Image (tube, grey):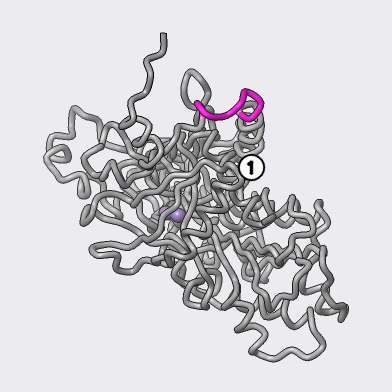
Amino acid sequence: MEEKKTEGQKLYEKLAFKSKNIWEHVSEEYKNEAFKFCEGYKNFLDEAKTEREFAEKTRLLAEEKGFVSLDEIIKSNTKLKAGMKVYRISKNKTAILSVIGKRQVSYGVKIVGAHIDSPRLDLKPTPLYEDTDMALLKTHYYGGIKKYQWVAIPLALHGVIVKGDGSIINVKIGEDENDPVFTITDILPHLAADQMQKKMSEGITGEGLNVLFGSIPYCDEKVKEKVKTNILNILNQKYGIIEEDFISAELEVVPAFKARDVGIDMSMVGAYGQDDRVCAYTALMAILEAENPDKTAICILTDKEEIGSVGNTGAESTLLENFVADLCALSTDNYNEMLLRNCLRNSKMLSADVNAAVDPNYESVFDKKNATYIGKGIALQKYTGVRGKVGGSDANAEFVGEIRQLFNKHGIIWQTGELGKVDQGGGGTIAQYVANLGVEVIDCGVPVLSMHSPFEVTSKIDIYNTYKAYKVFYEE
Ligand code: MN
Ligand code: MN
């Protein structure tokens, strides 16, 4: 027999805030939908391991769904009308999609923004060298990595090479099961006495992240670097390139393995690059399905977040501002800058980025009362930053209240938390750069285990829940 609740128990239930484990609060049907949604997600991850690949996949999906290039619309001198769907890919590395709303743009737009770059190893401008009858590639890591996680795993090579004549070669080696893979070797434990005495940050060095690339020499006694010569010959035959072409290339070394289900209950996804493709994918799916929104909906997928949102493909650039200016200009016959400023001032954004989930193996770095957990839904993060919120974005209480109300109204299960304990570390997102434009911004996304590692883990129920959250934001 169920015991009767005391007054105090009832009062506590009514007044205290408690986050929920979604699995316990949704139907079997919802769970099945989540599993199905994540099949599409895993396939997308396998095909879009770099920002360029993500941008290109986005373009294809957008066109399939009836989105038209904004630059084509500008050329054809047509005006935008409610319900129209437009997109712009910039520098082949960023994507912005928009569905034009019923209201005038001066009422503001609704933005969901994520980044599509991930930590990785980039090849140096002159990467190829020979040592000990082996060919290797020198790298310079990109973003925050724990270097020891990148040795002794299968690696793939993705990117572009711009040849001397300006033609472009797309490279993707290590993804097909018949492809070779690459790897960075580590020393055997038997001879690691010195290495094991070092601090973890020094056990593997940046200059030690050299990728094993080949080992057959070119058979000619007169040639000095025989293995390097043979590799250059293979590359020349396969791609028509010479060594100088590496200088105008962007070649990224990424884990070669595919996205997998994690757990005997298949409840999680393990894959490379889920920071932040888990939010980018969910945001993308939400905008692809947006139909006739009240306010204009925008999804922006940026590059370079992992190195500070810099450059003309990062969130600090004028990418978003220019796109919104174009929307404003194409919606009226007498555009002036105040229309853009008013639009931005009245706009709202969900900065869609991941948060660190509490890890039972490393509980001590979290304030468990202010942390996010896998399985408990989209993580609202009022502010980011390090050592006293420095360098982060801090959402206004009024806007946090608005989003909380929105999610509660639509049955979106959410949680809130900071990235780790005070003074333990911290991080930033693209939120601050968009907030600078006058837009109301809050960070919210999927909690991740093993964040920034070659194999990050997320919960399928959070992924689906986050997609639903971005959808209601556009639709409301
Ligand atoms: Mn991120
Ligand atoms: Mn990151």
| Residue 14: x %, y % from top left | 41, 38
Q: Residue at x 62, y 23 (%)?
A: 28
Say left or right for 424 vs 81.
left
Say left or right for 299 vs 278.
right
Q: What stretch is highlighted in magenta?
A: 23-30
Q: Which of 390 and 457 is in front in this view?
A: 390
Ligand 2 falls in quadrant: bottom left
Report which residue position mark 1 lands on.
44
**Number of residue marks:** 1
Q: Is mark 1 on a helix, strand or loop?
A: helix
Extreme-top residue of the structure: 1
Residue 152 occupies quadrant: top left
Q: Residue at x 33, y 25 (%)?
A: 6
Q: Please indicate, yes or no, whether residue 218 appears anywhere in the rendered image.
A: no
Say left or right for 214 vs 238.
left
| Residue 206: x %, y % from top left | 30, 54
Q: Residue at x 31, y 47 (%)?
A: 370
Residue 18 occupies quadrant: top left
Q: Which residue is drawn at 11% across and 40% down?
A: 197
**Where is 245 relative to 120, above or below?**
below
Q: Please indicate, yes or no, whether residue 313 appears anywhere in the rendered image.
A: yes
| Residue 176: x %, y % from top left | 62, 35
Please state, as top left, top right, bottom left or bottom right, where the C terminus lies in the image. Answer: bottom right
| 386 within the magenta span | no
Dominant secondary structure, magenta: helix
